[in-house]
Amino acid sequence: MLVVLNDVAEIMAGCSVVAALTGAGISAESGVPTFRGNEGLWAKFRPEDLASMEAFLANPKIVWEWYNWRRELIAKVTPNPGHIALA
């Protein structure tokens, strides 16, 4: 396993840009609500009412309020060990 990690580290050292795809769970540990699951945002809100072009066109005020609520929520959290490891 260590050989593979060293190989990956060597390859990445030569890259100017690296992207990492994670699941929502990486931010859940910091207190950011996920979208799916029993406690997810879509258990409380309908995505088509808040996260679609149709919703925005029908009621831009409520869509902006929802996104602003999420931005304020996220601004208060701190990175967790998973975020730090990625950074």
Image (cartoon, rainbow, N blue to C red):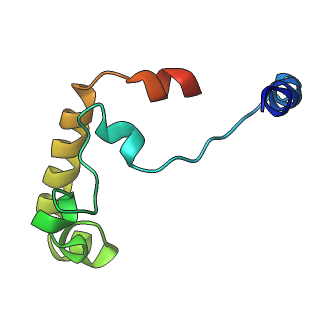
Q: Nearer the viewer, residue 50 or 4?
A: 4
Looking at the image, residue 26 lies above or below residue 5: below
Q: Nearer the viewer, residue 23 or 56?
A: 23
Q: Position of residue 5 (x, y in %)?
A: 78, 29
Q: Residue at x 26, y 26 (%)?
A: 77
In which quadrant of the rendered image does the C terminus lie? Answer: top right
Which image quadrant for residue 38? bottom left
Looking at the image, residue 71 lies above or below residue 83: below
Q: Is residue 87 visible?
A: no
Q: Residue at x 19, y 34 (%)?
A: 72
Looking at the image, residue 15 lies above or below residue 33: above
Which image quadrant for residue 55? bottom left
Horizontal side of 32 relative to 85 (left or right) equals left
Q: Residue at x 23, y 35 (%)?
A: 31
Horizontal side of 66 relative to 16 (left or right) equals left
Q: Position of residue 29 (x, y in %)?
A: 31, 34
